Amino acid sequence: MNSYDVAIIGSGPGGYVAAIRCAQLGMKTALIEKYSTLGGTCLNVGCIPSKALLSSSHHYEEATKHFEDHGIEIPGEIKVNLEKMIARKQSVVDQTTGGIDFLMKKNNIDVYEGLGSFKDATHIKITGKDTGEIEAKNIIIATGSKPSNLPFIKLDKERVITSTEALKLKEVPKHMIIIGGGVIGLELGQVYRRLGAEVTVVEYMDRILPTMDAGLSKELNKVFKKAKCKMMMSHKVQSVERKGDEVIVKAENKKGEVVEFKGDYCLVSVGRRPYTDGLNAEAAGVKINDKGQVEVNEHLQTLTKNIYAIGDVIKGAMLAHKAEEEGVFVAETIAGQKPHIDYNLIPGVVYTWPEVAAVGKTEEELKESGTAYKVGQFPFRALGRARASGDLDGFVKILADKSTDEVLGVHMIGARCADLIAEAVTAMEFRASAEDISRYSHAHPTFAEAVKEAALAATEDRALHV
C-alpha cells in the first residue's frame, strides 16, 4: 500500500492547486480523480469551455453587427458553424486539462483515476481504472459541486438541460428558455442569443444577479433587453414539460397569474449543489450538514482534525479562485504555516459582455449594517478608450467609508471588468482609501481610468471627465 503525507480527493482548481502547493512544500502527495481528465467542473464543463463559447460568439456578433461601423465589409453571408465552434471549445479544454497533467508530473504528484471513498480517517479506497487503497496522514476533500435542479423538473439532458449539455449542443436553439437569472444562465443565454436563438430568462427573484449590487443587475438587464432577450422577473416556475421537440414552462407571475413559455430547449440553471456522492464521509467521522456541505472550522478542518475540505463542497461562494485560495491555505496550514484568507476580498465576475465584477460590500449590505458610506460612480461612455472601441455600456462604482474614506466595495460593469477588478482587490487588501486610488497614475487611454475617475468621484465628488 502506498503511503502519502497528503492525499486530495478531487482535481478541480481547489484540488490540483492544493496538490501543487503541498508538493512545493516537500510533502509526498497523491491526487485522486474519478474522471479521465483532470481539472474538475471548471476546466471540463464550466469556466473554461463557457469562456471559449463566449469568445467565439462575441467574434460572430462583432462581425455581423459592428465590423461595418469600423469600415470592415465582408461580402456574402456570415454563417455560424456550431460544430466547429464546439470543436474549438473542446480543443481549448483539452489543452488546458493537458496542462494540469504536465503540472502533476512536474511536481512529482501521483495521480489515481477512480472514485475515492473513505475507509477510515487515514485510508482511502479507490475504485475505477486505478483500483486499490492508499494511506495518507492528511486528506483534503475537494469534490466540488454539480448542477442543482428543482424537484419537479425532469432533466432529460436532450431538451431539458443543464449547463453541461448547453456547452455541446448540436444546433442553435430556436427559443431557449432559461430558468434562473444567475451567472451561468446569463452567460450561456448571451452565447445563444448572439448565435440567433430567441432567449427568455425566467427568474424567481425581482432582478437578475440577485446577490450582486442592484445597480449592476439593473445595467445588465438593460443590455439583455437591448439584445431583445425577454427578462421575466418575479416568476415562480411551476412545471416543465417536454412534448416531442417542444418544451413548455409554466410559471406564476407576481400577480398570481400562470403564464406559459414554449421553446425547443430549456436550460435549468438554478445554482449548484455540493457533491459528496460515494465519499463515505461518515467512515472518517466527517460531518455533512443539511445543505450537503462538509462542515469545517476556520482552519478548514473537518471534525476529524487530519481531514480538511475546500471549494464548492464547503460553505461560501462557489468560485474556482476561492477554491484555489483555500487549497493553498490548507497546504500551508498542514506545513505549519499561518496563512490567511479574507473572504470579503474574493471577487465575483460574470463573463457576459459587458463584463460584471465586484468585490467587498454592496450598497444593500452597507445599508443593512448601518454603515455610513459615500458613493463615487463613473460611466464608461465618458472614456476615450471606450469610445474608440465602441464599448460604451457600464460604469464603475466605488463605495467608501464616510468618515475614513476606506474603500468598502467596488462594483463595475463594462469592457474588461473581469480584469479591472483585480486593481480593486489589491487596493482593498492594503486598506486603501478612495483618495489613494484617485492619486496614482492610470495610463491613458484605458478602461482602467474609470476606476480612477470613480475614486475621484468618491473623493469630494471631483471626477475630471464627467
Image: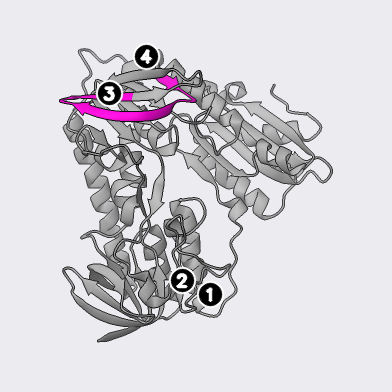
Tell me the kind of residue under disc 3: Ile
Tell us which disc is closer to us: 1 or 2.
Answer: 2
Tell us which disc is closer to us: 3 or 4.
Answer: 3
Horizontal side of residue 5 vs 315, given as left or right: left
Cα–Cα span, label 3 and label 4 = 43 Å
Closest to the observer: 68 or 164? 164
Residue to which mark 2 is pinned: 308
Highlighted range, magenta: 229-249
Give the position of the C terminus as an image quadrant.
top right
Label annotation for residue 71: 4
Q: At numbered mark 1, what does the secondary structure look like: helix, strand or loop?
A: helix
Residue to which mark 3 is pinned: 248
Residue to which mark 1 is pinned: 333
- Work out whether mark 4 precedes mark 2 in sequence or the reverse, and give the earlier one: 4
Tell me the kind of residue under disc 2: Tyr
- Work out whether mark 2 precedes mark 3 in sequence or the reverse, and give the earlier one: 3
Q: Residue at x 24, y 80 (%)?
A: 133
Horizontal side of residue 405 vs 16, given as left or right: right
Cα–Cα span, label 2 and label 3 = 44 Å
Horizontal side of residue 315 vs 50, given as left or right: right
In magenta segment, residue 125: no
Tell me the kind of residue under disc 4: Gly
- Work out whether mark 3 precedes mark 4 in sequence or the reverse, and give the earlier one: 4
